[in-house]
Image (cartoon, rainbow, N blue to C red):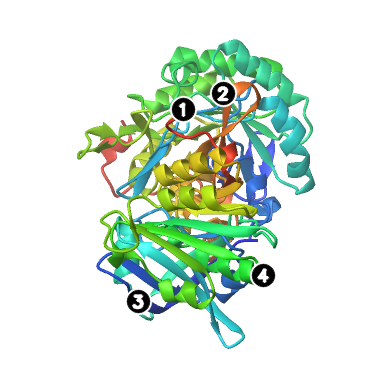
Amino acid sequence: MPRDVEARVLQNTRLSPDYNVITLAAPEIAAATRPGQFVMVRSSHGSDPLLRRPFSVFEIVRSGNRIEGLSLLSKRIGVTTRLLFDAVEGDVISCLGPLGRPFDPVSPPSEAWMVAGGVGLAPFATLTEALLERGAKTTLFYGARTGAELFYLDWFASRGVRLVLSTEDGSKGERGRVTLPLEQALRETSSEVMIYACGPERMLEAVSHVAGKFKTPAQVSVERVMGCGMGGCYSCVIPVREAGGRHHYVRSCLAGPVFTASDLVWDHE
Amino acid sequence: MDLSVEIGTLRLSNPLIAASGCYGYGVEYADAVDLSTLGAIASKGLFLAPREGHPPPRIVETPSGMLNAIGLQGIGVHRYIAEKLPELRRLGATNIVNICGSTLDEYVELARILSDAEGVHALEINISCPNIKEGGITFGCSMHGTFDVVSAVKKVTHLPVIPKLTPNVTDVASIAKAAEDAGADAVSLVNTFLAMAIDVETRRPKLSNIVGGLSGPAIRPIAVRMVYECRRTVKIPVIGMGGIASAVDALEFIIAGATAVQVGTANFVDPFIWSKLTAGIEDYMRRHGVRRIADLVGSVDTSTREKEWVSS
């Protein structure tokens, strides 16, 4: 059951001029969250902005064994993300969740390959913890525009996650898109692999294409313009395949945000 | 305190109704809300057959509001009866089923089918969706069209019939009057205002459908005025909606003349809004010594204001 929590901001760390990690005191939501689920955030109490915005839960924040809240990884692009960037400790932000269909974490002998583009890193901290619990060997393919926008590398490395980095400007890791090293690795591996991807839709489409080429299963987390997060408004739809080559719109808040990649119909097919 | 209201032969435990198109089929919210505590649920608009709706983007936020052009994606009346109604009955929901037709015959057929289904309490006749080309709003934009649809539906159903009116007309009260003359048990208004938003960087419309319907607090004062006008013109109950986001907003509509109110966009923001609205209304009734909410309906006091316009 989703809850609506008026959550206090416990901490707000600016990672760059655009990225921040904001920690919210919503332990009830955090305790119920599974990897890949999201919350609907409202950062105003008036009608501007009016609607909530969806955010993947980034970390479950603990103090010892006690769950204190959850954090969100945010990139400043619109009005809500600007308010989240500017928020200070003690501010109150309304947080509704957990919502949506989570990732399905694999167990050995299958390996987990996470593919993140930019702020699409967000669902992979909680997924990493679930994968480590199962003992799955885990790799993170992580791409960004520039090296200064690759975050939390120590967090993942210290947990034994193998990192494969790429940047569009070549300032860190391989130059180019994250799907290049992914494809290279798929060509070379003999292991059973499950791909998990989150990032811009063009990236998800490319990952899906590469996964299909190597007959590797993939779960992708999509982000569509979303009104309510509860299935009420039918705005966040995405086309899925149907028999006979047709497609059918499903609500990404209920049927997703995590989908089996091969079920989705992409823009450039 | 008595919060119950009557819409024709239908008695609602309270005047708060989830607005069509804003609450799925109701069952989506069953985990979060006890659906039997709502006055009623107006279902997502149903045609005879399933519909895919418009491609995304289907919504865009605007100042104190939002535009939508969903395009009436839906499962069709048969799947609604088979898959949704049993659960809604089990949960004790009061169901106002919203029906849409491309033709007059489709409205009649839908009304006939739903009149035989157990657990349907009223029909809301959608003659006001601004986002589809065929049927619907073409009826709702004229007195004749409204009269024809309502009288045809009335002939085949015992259920209360509530045409939902569009504000995209010159004189909504005359449309309400045509509905009343045709035998409507109530009217609900307003549907959304036809509107548009453009991304100036790309010069593209922000919605795939180019235009869409504006809802939310931005439209509230216009909707209140329209409810007031209809209340002065017809004797049947008026169900008011348009940007209600608080108990004060709901009371404003009731005092303007709404027997019941619908809440749409605000439910997107706060799915737990219902108990807050009820508490706020009860608090108001206590403070003002109002025992029955029905006594508040249309109680706006215009005596000290512009008499000329009011009595025109």
Up-down relation of residue A146 to residue B24 (above or below): below
Residue that extends furthest to the bottom in the rendered view of this protein: A64
Cα–Cα gap, marks 1 and 4? 53 Å
Callout 1 and callout 4 share a chain:
no
- What's the chain of the residue with tag 1? B
**Circle 3 residue:** A13
Mark earlier in primary sequence (2, 1): 2
Q: Nearer the viewer, residue A242 or A115?
A: A115
Q: Nearer the viewer, mark 3 or mark 1?
A: 3
Cα–Cα gap, marks 2 and 1? 9 Å
Q: Would you call the spot at circle 1 few (<14 residues within 10 Å), some (14-19), or many (20 or more)? A: many
Callout 2 and callout 1 share a chain:
yes
Question: Percent from the top left, x then y, of residue B230?
Answer: 43, 32
What is the three-letter code of the residue carrying label 1? Cys
Q: Is residue B62 left or right of residue B132?
A: left
Cα–Cα gap, marks 3 and 4? 31 Å
Cα–Cα gap, marks 2 and 4? 54 Å
User: What residue appears at the point 42 percent right and 27 percent down from the top-left corner?
Assistant: B130
Marks 3 and 1: CB-CB under 8 Å?
A: no
**Circle 1 residue:** B129
At mark 1, the secondary structure is loop
Callout 2 and callout 4 share a chain:
no
**Circle 4 residue:** A135
Q: Would you call the spot at circle 2 few (<14 residues within 10 Å), some (14-19), or many (20 or more)? A: many
Cα–Cα gap, marks 2 and 3? 50 Å
Q: Would you call the spot at circle 3 few (<14 residues within 10 Å), some (14-19), or many (20 or more)? A: some
Q: Nearer the viewer, mark 3 or mark 4?
A: 4
Q: Nearer the viewer, mark 1 or mark 4?
A: 4
User: What residue appears at the point 42 percent right and 46 percent down from the top-left corner?
Assistant: A203
At mark 3, the secondary structure is strand
What is the three-letter code of the residue carrying label 3? Thr
The answer to whether residue A69 is visible is yes
